[in-house]
Amino acid sequence: MKKLFGTDGIRAVAGQPPLDPATVHAIGLALANSLGPNPRILMGQDTRESSDWIAATLTSGLTLGGATVESAGVITTPAVAFLTHTHGFSAGIVISASHNPWEDNGIKLFGPDGYKLPDATELKIEEEIFKQLALAPQTPEPSNPPPVNEADRAEYVQFLLSLVPGLSLDNKRIVVDCANGAASAVAPQLFAGLGGEVIITHASPTGRNINEHCGALHPDIVAAEVVAQKASMGITFDGDADRALFADEHGNVVNGDAVLLLAARDLQARSLLSNSTVVATTMSNMGLEAALKRSQIRMLRAPVGDKYVLEQMLSTGASLGGEQSGHIIFSGKSTTGDGLLTALLLLDILHRANKSLAALLTDLKVFPQVIINVKVREKKPLELIPTVVAAIAEAEQALADTGRVVIRYSGTEALARVMIEAESEPLMRHHAEAIAQAIRAELAV
């Protein structure tokens, strides 16, 4: 069982295990040792103040292992995946904790094909990390990070624009929230020249304001700005821009489920939706499933995590998949969730349909849904806690065929997530709080 890697790489408070200097150095050395002789590594990072020292410490370990390291600087996670594959790097590394607070950071790894590493490969790298820590627990001096190749961002932007030839904002006004993260370095360049008026917000990173009251973690912020600016649409990214959420012209938040519906229908109409199938996750709303079914589109559910969505897409031949949180994967266009790509493709759908975002979503009837996050001191198997098992069983019996209960631990934070959706909102909230309280009583910090 993996101890370091979660559903999206290694993530922790920067400076504390497993992101203390000794372990970060060992991660670099272990990765270099796992890739064969003289590997070439591409590294990118988000805007957290800890990203620089982590990059320098990783570089020290990588070069000690015989690797050559190149830097794309501050850039989005999917850009690193694209550049790694395009330029034949042995691996890509992204230093980011995505939607987490600025105090956290993380290390994500991509293989030479641009895909996130499978669990089995991560487990082998973990074994090598622990081996290196046992051999040399002291941290050598960090290396000077390699110079940033400024051309990388421009190449990625041109790649994205090539996927939407003829796209125009049709002289509309849109609001783009960069979350003071990696999108701050890319989005202004991407949206320039598409016509219309683009209002860029939260694109002034300080190292400590990433995701702070902005971005995809707070989509109500961009929604309110859309109303204030009388804009046609809002787009909001998370810290590393591998996902995006939206707001329609009325200031309503539009999540990943709605994007999946619009993208699936558009691809289906153009005979581009493989097997008439979409891969979503256990968190996707029953309303999405019902709307897709009306369009003769089948929906499969994968575990939460875009890497697991992708695995099911590859195994079933699906061309579209994603998460309610805004990770959307378009097979053949990207190897991972890409918020900037999702935004462009959604804008392209609206442009070709000549309709507003709200107008295209009139028949999506969302079941009431609540998610309660419970901070936990440990991730004890929930099935071993009798009071939690009893609370879940009671909820499932009460809801029967009129709702769903999904309880899981976060793969990136010390949280238990309680999600219930049901036709009856009072019943939904009652049982969600009952389950959350049972977890608190046993595992609360």
Image (tube, rainbow, N blue to C red):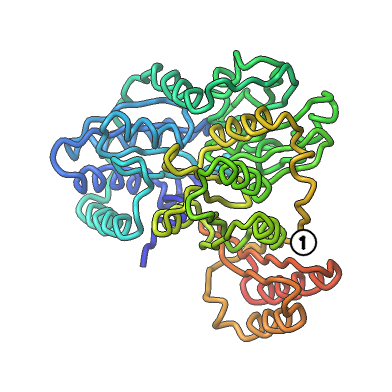
Q: Is residue 177 left or right of residue 71?
A: right
Decide if residue 153 is in sight here: yes
Q: Is residue 350 left or right of residue 23?
A: right
Count of labels in the image: 1
Identify the element where label 1 is drawn.
loop
Quarter the N terminus occupies: bottom left
Pinpoint residue 244: horizontal percent, then vertical percent.
61, 39
- Mark 1, residues whose alpha carbon is within 10 Å: few (<14), some, or many (≥20)? some
- Vertical relation: 377 (above or below) 94: below
- Vertical relation: 112 (above or below) 164: below
Residue behind mark 1: 367
Q: Is residue 289 left or right of residue 20?
A: right
Residue at left offset 71%, top offset 20%: 199
Q: Which of 29/163 is in front?
A: 163
Type of amino acid under label 1: Phe
Q: Which of 32/85 is in front?
A: 85
Pinpoint residue 259: horizontal percent, then vertical percent.
64, 44
